[in-house]
Structure formats: C-alpha cells, structure tokens
Amino acid sequence: MLTIKDGNVKSNTGKVVIGYDLGKTFAQISFFDSSMKEPETVSPVAGSEMYNIPLVLAKRPGVGQWFYGREALKYANEGGILVDNLLERAERGEEVIVENESYDPVALLTLFIKRSLSILNLRVSSKNVAAYMFTLEKLSARAVEVLSKVVSSLQLKCETITYQSHVESFYNYMIHQNEELWKYQVMILEFNDYLKTMRFECTKNTKPEVVFINQNEYEDMTRMSFSEDETIRKREYQELDEKFNECCKDVFSDTDVTTVYLLGDGFKEKWAEESLKTICKNRRVFQGNNLYCKGACYGMMDKINPSEVYKSHVFLGKDKVKANVGLKALRRGEDSYLAILDAGSNWFEANADFEVYLEEGNEIGFVITSLTGGNVNEKTIVLDGLPERPRGTTRLAVHIEMSSVNTLEIEIEDLGFGVIMKSSGRAWTQSINI
C-alpha cells in the first residue's frame, strides 16, 4: 500500500483489500489492510469527505472521449451526452444508443468502474491488492453474471474477486464494531428515494451464534424536493418530519433496538427535528454514508484471514445456505463426517466436487444440519443399476451445487476402479430440499 504523509509517499508491503460499493446512482471505494484500525474510504475530490462517485458517463460529441462521475455531470451541462443508470442498463442488457451508435451496457459499466478505480492510484499500489469485494443493494444471479463479465474485462491482477449484498456488508461492518453497539438489536434507516430499514439481531443460543437481518420498505415514506422559498420550505420540512416521526414509531415498536444508523441522501437536509427525538430516545445514533463500502472491506478481509468474531458468528440472510451439508464417510477405518457445504455461504456460490470410494452397497448418505432449528436430517441417494463389485472397488465422482437457496442438486458418476473395474458409464442426479 502507498500512503501519503506530509507530501511524501511511503510504501507498505502489506496486502490490501478493496471494497467497492456499486449503488444505483453512485459508487464508493474503500481500502483496508491488517495494519489499519478500520477501512478508509477514498474521495474523488481531494481533501474532502465527498465519497459518492456519480454512476454516470458522458461522451464528447463527435469523438470517442468519455468522462465519468462528477466530471461527466459537469461536461453534460456543457454539451456532453450523458449516460446514466449504468448498472440497471447492464442488468437488463439494454442496448445504449449514443449518436446513432450502439454500445454494450456491460462495456460502459466496465469503463466506469475502470476509471473510478483510478482514484486509488495515489493511495494503493495495484501490486499489493490481494482482493476486491463488490457490494450491491441486491445481489441477484443476473447481477453476479454482469459483474463477472465486468471483472473479466477489467483483468484485475489479484488473488480474489467476489460479491455480496448491502445486507451482508451491514453484517460484516457491525461485527467489527464494539460489541456494546450490537449487544442488542441494531437498525439501519436508509432514506434515498424512499425509506428502507434493516434490523440486525444476534442469537446467543447457538454455536456459532447466528445473525438475522430483517428488511422492510416503506414506499409511502418518499423523499421530496424542497422549495427554494424559505417559508414554504420550513412547512415542507415540518410535514416530512411529522410523517417520518409516525413512521419511526411504527418501525421501532416491539423491537429492542439500541443502535441506529442513518444512511442516504434523504437525510442531508436538516428537516428531521421531532423524528430525531423519537429515534434518539435511549439509543445511540450515527449518521454517515459509507457503511456498506467499509463493510465490504471487512467481509473481504475475513474471507482471506478470518477474525475470531467472524469464526464465532454466521449470517443467515435470504441468499444464504441455511444448513451445513456433509457426508457420512469412513476414514482410516473409523466413522467420520466430511463437511461439504457450510451454512452462511451464498447459495449461488455454494458448490463442491470430490471423489469417494463406496465401501459396500449402492447408497450414499448425506447429512443436513439446519442452523435455524429442527432436527439433523439424513438424505440417502440410491444408485440404481450400479454394478456389484468387490468391497471398496467403486470410485464415484460427486458434484454438488445449489439451484436455489433451499434446493441442493447432486450429481454422481460411476468412475469404476481404474483398469481393474471399468466404469459403467452410469450417472445419477437428485434434488434435495434443505
């Protein structure tokens, strides 16, 4: 990593992780290494805390010159051709027409990300970057497909590149804060176009401890454009404050929330006077806008070098595998358990390939251990038509992946036993609900 102090550039050979928050309308970039107390978010405006990079491009008419971020907005006001909604267009696969020429939306998103990463150049040496974590509001299979194409085109030279949702970034951020802040429930109030909430709750009766995050949306609590007339604006402030105050009373009812984070551009204007009194009553309240970006850094660092708090907790979000999947096996003559998939991993990333030798019979037993309650289940797959062979001379290739958050797909192929027992060529597939 390169750090700047008193105008001098000093090197640090420690490996760095990058957290990249790719929102609908803006991006943010943070970096983190093991020598730092917490991740640092980079501002595109030197010396400021303006972390948002507008998610837009602008083309210079008649030539192939593109601008990004704030420069793109400025140039668009001077006659440039603005292209916005880059992430949404890429996810939809929507062709972008500029000056009667067609552009691939994924290529334009790639251009934006490449240009925006350049703001790291004075802070981080690319040769020291070990991993990138991209975090999005919602991490769908289509979003992962788009990001995979982007990453392939960027040709980032690092060991690991992965993705997670804002909800998981919230989880990663919180578990690295003082435990007093999340001893009870924690709430995010995010107000951009409309109000969204996330409520963090940790159970203490399991090993590892399980964290759940409940999400809600209040689309009737919408952001508004305030009048430039001071008298009218004060009335608008009051009306929004009253509406938000009633909403907050509903949001916090029947909860044990002791910590609140206010996120989003909707809180920039100082209109929330009465509602803040409701929010702050017996609670610690923080306001900021780079929580997800920092959470992405914490999450990536834990994947590379798991912290103790990471190892002792597991997050079970809606995209997470809710059970451990294993296999009954015989090792060195003793019954044992082979772990295959771990609860808490993203279902669309959960997969495994391995080989086993069948001791006898034509069955394989899988063990499903739920972390959300319920008994340990055993699922047996019968390999109909498997040739009878001497004990321990059947080798099987097993591939496992998730087709949905609750559905496990298992493929088993008979490999035979070298030249002694030829493969039958048979294969078996089965879906298991976990």
Image: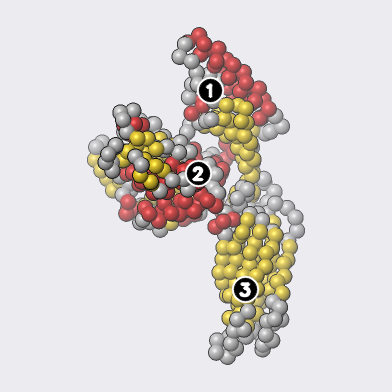
Per the image, the residue denoted by label 3 is 412
Q: According to the image, label 2 marks what residue?
A: 136
Q: Residue at x 59, y 63 (%)?
A: 401
Figure check: 300 above or below 28: below
* On screen, residue 344 above or below 191: below
Mark nearest the camera among 1 and 3 is: 1
Q: Residue at x 67, y 25 (%)?
A: 249
Query: Residue 179, which numbered label?
Result: none
- Mark 2 and mark 3 residues within 8 Å of each other at the beta carbon: no
Q: Residue 224, which numbered label?
A: 1
Q: Residue furthest bottom?
A: 420
- Determine whether, in the image, residue 49 is placed left or right of residue 362: left
Frontmost residue, 166 versus 208: 166
- Label 1 – label 3 distance at C-alpha: 57 Å
Q: Which one is earlier in the sequence, the residue at label 1 or at label 3? A: 1
Q: Quadrant of the C terminus?
A: bottom right
Residue 188 is situated, as x and y percent measured from the top left of the image, at: 57, 34
Q: What separation in Å lies between label 2 and label 3 (alpha carbons)?
A: 35 Å
Q: Determine the residue located farthest toward the top in the rendered image.
A: 231
Q: How far apart, in angstroms, are the residues tagged by discs 2 and 1? A: 24 Å
Coloration mode? secondary structure
Q: Where 363 sits versus 376, above or below?
A: below
Q: Is residue 383 left or right of residue 342?
A: right
Q: Residue at x 64, y 40 (%)?
A: 214
Discs 2/1, front: 1
Identity, as a three-letter code, of the amino acid under mark 1: Met
- Callout 1 environment at 10 Å: few (<14), some (14 to 19), or many (20+)? few
Identify the image quadrant of residue 218.
top right
